[in-house]
Amino acid sequence: MKNIKVATAVLAATMGTTFVGEALAADVTWNVSLWGKRRAFTEHVEKLSEEVAARTNGKFEIKLHYGGALSKSRENLDGIAIGAFEMAQFCASYHADKNPSLTTTDLPFLGVPDLETQVKVDFALYNHPAVQKDLGRWNAKLLMPSPMPQYNLLGKGDEPAKLADFEGMRVRALGGIGNAMKTIGAVPTSVTAAEAYQAIDSGTVQAVAFAPHAHLSFKTIEAGSWWTANLNPGTVSCPVVVSTDAYEFLPQEFKTALDESVEPAIQHYLDTYAKVYDKFYPALEASGVKQITFSDEELEAFKSVAGKPIWDQWVKDMSAKGLPAAELLALVQNTIAGE
């Protein structure tokens, strides 16, 4: 950490001259580190770039770099810390020890009903001083979330109707969702996304946990017979951050342009995902996949067995690290409840 701070300070001093010069010339270029290719997951960054350019008459350019051209996905936060680029997207679960506060929304069975609610939850969390301080250690300013849909299950064979039906079920579920499924008696199985269709078709696994767009991309719908429409076991937190130093060096008009571009960028993201759902549900129907809706009582049972014990342990662990964990969890829960 000491080396990172020293490098940041040195780079910031060097960058200071650059940014001031650029600001005087009213011509600033920021580089964004992304992985993979352009997709729904990055559409808000694309829109942000367009909005900022339009609001500044092209004087502030946000340049997107895909395919890990600037950094590996799991090293994007480090790149921000040392000033290698000005903006990046990453997922909190890639390095939970570096951003423990963000793992609040990675907890299972929080009961997030839709992406609009997830956006509200993420921004509420980002605005908490403890979260800002946590990311501040990496010279990172939280700009906007990349709200991911809930990773519901698509399966084949006997359809589950209650908690006990998951006992012994082999499920492709990773990370926190995998741990949650394990607590209810399921057997989490490591299968790559590319292997998911074959795994469910052959019976290697009985269900796969993906967000809807991934079920479409990897064609698991074509192999399955049921879908848990409202189980909502969890998702992943993947924010977009900017370098605090780079942001502070911006002239006020560019800061304003960036800040005011976030809302239309997020709306564009939501509109893009709405189109994904427009394809997803007809695909379920076309493949004869039955949508399973669990009762409120069963959902409470899932939360009690696979949610609360994990939340309680998380609060204990995060509190030991000096975070106001109970307060962060309550903030998320209250925001979900609309309070």
Image (spheres, rainbow, N blue to C red):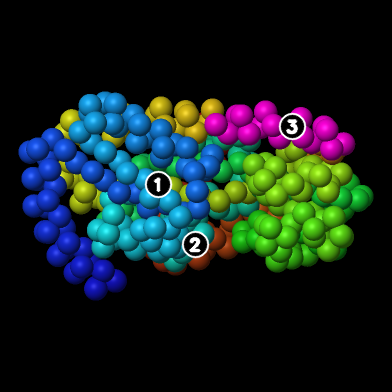
Q: Describe the element under mark 1 as helix, strand or loop.
A: strand
For the residue pair 129 and 14, the one nearer the viewer reads as 14
Q: Describe the element under mark 3 as helix, strand or loop.
A: helix
Residue drawn 24% across the image and 73% down it = 3
- Residue 180 in sight: no
Label 3: how many Cα within 10 Å (few below 14, some 14–19, many 20+): some
Give residue 281's mark: 3
Residue drawn 60% across the image and 49% down it = 235
Label 1: how many Cα within 10 Å (few below 14, some 14–19, many 20+): many
Residue 187 x/y as whole percent? 78, 65
Residue 164 x/y as whole percent? 86, 54
Q: Is 73 above or below relative to 53?
A: below
Amino acid marked by disc 2: Tyr
Q: Describe the element under mark 2 as helix, strand or loop.
A: helix
Where does the magenta region start and end? 272-288
Residue drawn 50% across the image and 53% down it = 36
Which quadrant of the figure has residue 293?
Answer: top right
Question: Is residue 279 on the magenta stretch?
Answer: yes
- Residue 246 in sight: yes
Residue 231 x/y as whole percent? 73, 43
> Which residue matches tag 1?
240
Of the residues under marks 3 and 2, which one precedes in the sequence? 2
Q: Is residue 249 left or right of residue 181?
A: left
Amino acid marked by disc 3: Tyr
Q: Is residue 44 left or right of residue 59?
A: right
Residue 188 x/y as whole percent? 74, 64
Report the label total: 3
Residue drawn 20% across the image and 51% down it = 245
> Which residue matches tag 2?
94
